[in-house]
Each structure stands twice: as C-alpha cells, then as structure tokens.
Image (spheres, grey):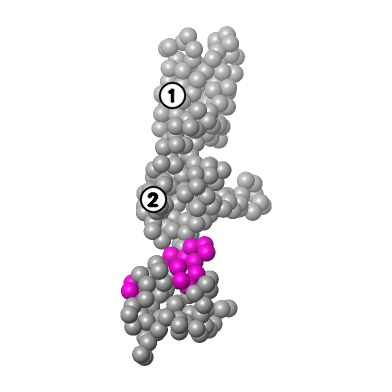
C-alpha cells in the first residue's frame, strides 16, 4: 500500500489514542512572543484575561502589572501568577492558563513532502502531525527523515534525530513519531532509484526498496519484450565514483541504488 494511504489512518489513531497524553504535554509548551494566553483565576471571574505576549516577553495582568512569561511552560506561567497574586492580593489563588493562539513556535520541513515550508507548532506537535500539515510524502520519498535540533546550550553540538518512515507510516510504530520543537529543521530524504532500459515493456526509473532482485526489477518494469535477450541482461553500476559493466547478471542479483539494468535485443 502506498505511504500516502497509511498517513491519514495513523494520524486518526494517534488523535484517538493519544489525545489525553498530548493534552497533558501541552502544559509543558514553552510560551513565547506572539502567543495569545487565556488566564483565569478560580472564583475571581473579574480577573479573566486574554492577552498576547509582547515583544519583550511580558504580559499585563490585573493587580500585579507586567509579568515576564516568555520562556516559561504553561504550567510555570500559572504558578508564577499564583505566587504574585498570593503576595498580598488573593489568598491561595488557583490560576489556569490556556493557549488561545500559538504564534511563537515554528519548525521547518523540507525534502520529499508535498508542501515544504515553515509551520507554526500548535502546542505539542509530533513529526506525523507536522507531516500531515505538509501535505504528506511525495512518491519519491525514501524511508528516512532527519530532524536537526538546535544545541541546548552554547558550545554544544546540534542534535540529529533519525526517523524510520517505513516503521512509522507503514507499520504504525509510534515510537518513531518524535516530538517536534521550536527551531527544528526536518528533511525527508529522497529514495534511491534504479533504472531499467532496453527490451523491456516499461523502461523507466523505479524506487529502490529492500530486497529487490534483477528479476523483481524486470517484473516491476512490465517484463521482457518478445525481442529481449533474457540471458544477456547487464547492469551498469557505479562503484567508488566509477562505472563498471556487469555482464550476464543472474536474476537473483540484488539491485543497488543508481543501477542501470540493460536488457539487450536478441539477434535470433
């Protein structure tokens, strides 16, 4: 089954099965400039505030004035406001913070996706959710996606996370569905291809897959024509940057990326 048919099914399953988990993880979302917050204080309806975080990373809240919140998690924002309100304003306040609009967190997805570009992260976001926004994988997508993550501290190296798309999209292995965070750069690798030409019914390039033999490659290309010299199939193969010609290859020879399978014409 094509990858693009698996994707909607997997996303739906994640939303049904993982809703509670995602909701909890949203409380760990790090707020930033541009995010719109909805803040309520239990039993104090007059303190309901809907406010956007300004360029300085602050909000204006009744009674306590300017509050620096950028860089804090949703839970930490609530705790900070509770502490400030408890300092002479309200006894044992209970504050709830919700994100009305996500504007501060973004990630880039490029490579073999239908709509590559920069996307806003709407709270806790996984790779598969971002991939769905990017319009699914293209037909040329390989089995690997790479996430490049900014260093956590100065002097540290960037982190590289590899996602096995075959396990994730086709087999539903959600352990591969990595969370995406602000500043991540994601690249979906193009699949390797091989070529079949000569006396073959559908000469073309084909996506390399695990375990493809010459026989399977020829079958994918529609099979031999009536004029094919079936016993003299050749492969032009690049090895260490140089081309070599493999004569009279066996049908169980494994096909490699960039191989050119040549089926010559029979003289009889």
Q: Residue at point 53% right, 74% down?
A: 253
User: How far across and down, in percent of the image, does residue 174 sit?
Assistant: 53, 42
Q: Which mark, by number, is residue 38?
A: 1
Q: Is residue 207 magenta?
A: yes
Q: Quadrant of residue 219?
A: bottom left
User: How far across and down, in percent of the image, does residue 27 sit?
Assistant: 53, 29
- In front of the other: label 1 or label 2? 2
Do residues under tags 1 and 2 come within 8 Å of each other at their CB atoms? no
SS label for mark 1: strand
Q: Which comes before the other along the chain, label 1 or label 2?
A: 2
Q: Which mark, by number, is residue 4?
A: 2
Question: Where's the C terminus, which quadrant?
Answer: bottom left
Q: Residue at point 54% right, 15% down?
A: 94
Above or below 90: residue 252: below
Foreground residue, 226 or 20? 226
Q: Residue at point 36% right, 54% down?
A: 114
Q: State the separation of the CA atoms marked 1 and 2.
A: 37 Å
Q: Is residue 209 visible?
A: yes
Q: Is residue 34 visible?
A: no
Question: Dot 1 surroundings within 10 Å: few (below 14), some, or many (20 or more)?
Answer: some
Magenta-tinted stretch: 200-216
SS label for mark 2: helix
User: How far across and down, in percent of the image, does residue 246 sit?
Assistant: 52, 83
Above or below 116: residue 128: above
| Residue farthest toward the bottom in the current orientation of the protein | 267
Q: Is residue 210 magenta?
A: yes
Total tally of numbered discs in the picture: 2
User: How far across and down, in percent of the image, does residue 50 sit?
Assistant: 41, 24
């Amino acid at each position: 089954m094509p990858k693009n048919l698996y994707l909607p099914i997997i996303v739906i399953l994640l939303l049904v099965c993982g809703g509670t988990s995602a909701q909890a993880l949203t409380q760990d979302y790090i707020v930033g400039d541009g995010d719109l917050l909805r803040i309520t204080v239990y039993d104090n309806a007059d303190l309901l505030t809907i406010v956007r975080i300004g360029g300085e990373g602050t909000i204006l809240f009744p009674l306590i004035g300017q509050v620096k919140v950028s860089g804090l998690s949703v839970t930490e924002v609530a705790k900070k406001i509770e502490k400030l309100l408890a300092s002479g304003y309200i006894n044992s306040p209970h504050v709830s913070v919700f994100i009305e609009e996500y504007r501060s967190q973004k990630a880039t997805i490029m490579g073999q996706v239908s709509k590559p570009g920069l996307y806003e992260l709407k709270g806790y976001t996984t790779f598969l959710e971002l991939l769905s926004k990017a319009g699914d994988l293209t037909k040329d997508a390989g089995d690997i996606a790479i996430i490049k993550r900014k260093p956590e501290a100065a002097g540290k190296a960037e982190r590289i996370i590899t996602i096995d798309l075959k396990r994730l999209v086709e087999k539903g292995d959600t352990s591969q569905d990595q969370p995406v965070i602000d500043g991540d750069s994601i690249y979906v690798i193009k699949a390797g291809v091989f070529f079949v030409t000569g006396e073959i019914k559908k000469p073309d390039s084909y996506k390399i897959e695990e375990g493809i033999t010459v026989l399977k490659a020829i079958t994918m290309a529609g099979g031999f024509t009536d004029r094919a010299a079936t016993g003299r199939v050749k492969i032009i193969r690049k090895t260490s940057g140089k081309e070599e010609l493999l004569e009279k290859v066996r049908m169980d020879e494994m096909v490699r990326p960039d191989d050119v399978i040549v089926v010559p014409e029979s003289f009889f």
